[in-house]
Amino acid sequence: MDLPRQPRRRRRTLVLSAFAAALTVGGLSAAGFAARDSGLPTVAARSVRTATVERGPMLREVEAPGSLVAEDLRWITASERARVDRIVVEPGTEITADTVIVELANPDLELQLLEAESELAAARAELANLEAELETEKISQQVTVAAVRSERSDARRTADANTELSAHGNVARAELERSTEKAEELEERLDLERRRLGVLGRARKAQISAQASRVDQLAAVVEFRRTQIARLKVTAGAKGVLREVPVELGQWVDPGTTLATLVQPDKLEAELRVPEVRAKDVRVGQRVRIDMRTADIDGIVSRIDPAVEGGTVTVDVRLEGPLPQGARPDLTVEGVVELEHIEDALQVRRPANVESGTRVSVFRVGPDGLAERTSVTLGRASMEMIEIVDGLEPGDVVIVSDTSAWDGSQRIRIAD
């Protein structure tokens, strides 16, 4: 039995209705996806900085500000209590060892010098008088010795003559004995006078030596007083540049008070202030590049201050080679310390506000322009690059600028 055929118009109506339904479902689905993506934060590509993860050698460095300081700073101090009478040279002047920097005055020292010179003159006069007196005594004793020697000689001749005459019976025995005794007496007297002359000579030498020692002592006092007066004209003592004169005219200074400081401009070192969080990797002997604005110069870390002050650690750098023109104490410089050379490291340009050895989340950018938050473990860091321990692969693109504005978002859209 043949079924009745539906009218052609009705079949067309059913097809159109099915197609419309399909369009409706598809439209709803597309609208849903669009609604979901439209809720993501959108940022212009020009407002963010991105970097690509790469593998290769990495130079770890740390940058720190600082200044040039004198390697050999000379303090010129007062040796006596005195008043500042004149400041001869102003700071910044190149001076030699004999240059007078400050002139001091002390009337008491001048009076002490006059007294010492007077005592020295009196002692020298006393020494001269003593020498004259002792010389007179010596001559007098020599005359006495000569006279006794002459008498002894006469007495000996008389005794010899009497002895010869007595042998022929021409001289009485008593006369012979008297002449002999007189000769012996004069012999003994001559010996005593000679001994006295020797004692006078030794005493003379001791007295003159004692007085001469007093003269020398007083001469040393005079020389010391003169030196004190001479030191009132304070000289540099070395060649260099006068850095500071921290005294004023009319000021009284005590011994040890600093009158001036002197530096040698060709003997400078750099003093860097390294942030304490990065100073832990700095070691003595590491290479350093010092930027002096007009030129760069190499150096080596020579000392690391054990204390932290103001959030920084002071690092001293010994400079190598001749200093560039314009180098002077207190000149502001920038130093870059070479911490380590890593032969092979997975690395990326250092994102903002991150530190080495931490785990952070960064936005990894996909090819569709969507950036998704990814957890990353960071390793060693340099000034510009930081090591990736895990979480990223070579070729990944991440946002390295500040992303704190999207802390509550897991994904963001990057629009051209």
Image: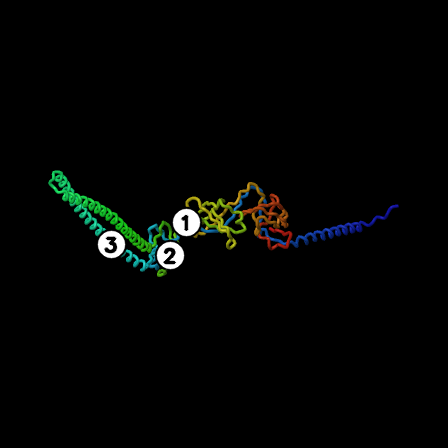
Residue 126 tag number: 3
Quarter of the view holding residue 150: top left
Q: Earlier in the sequence, mark 3 or mark 1?
A: 1
Rate crowding at label 1 as few (under 14), some (14 to 19) or many (20 or more) other CA atoms within 10 Å.
Answer: some
Task: State how far apart marks 1 and 2 are (Cα).
Answer: 22 Å
Inspect this view and state whether residue 2 appears: yes
* Residue 155 x %, y %: 15, 44
Residue type marked 2:
Pro
Q: What secondary structure is marked by label 1?
A: loop
- Within the image, what quadrant is residue 126 found in? bottom left
N-term-proximal mark, 1 vs 2: 1
Q: Position of residue 367 (x, y in %)?
A: 63, 46
Viewer-nearest residue: 283 or 187: 187
Report the number of numbered marks.
3
Q: SS of the residue at dot 3?
A: helix
Q: Which residue is mark 1?
A: 72
What residue is shown with label 2? 255
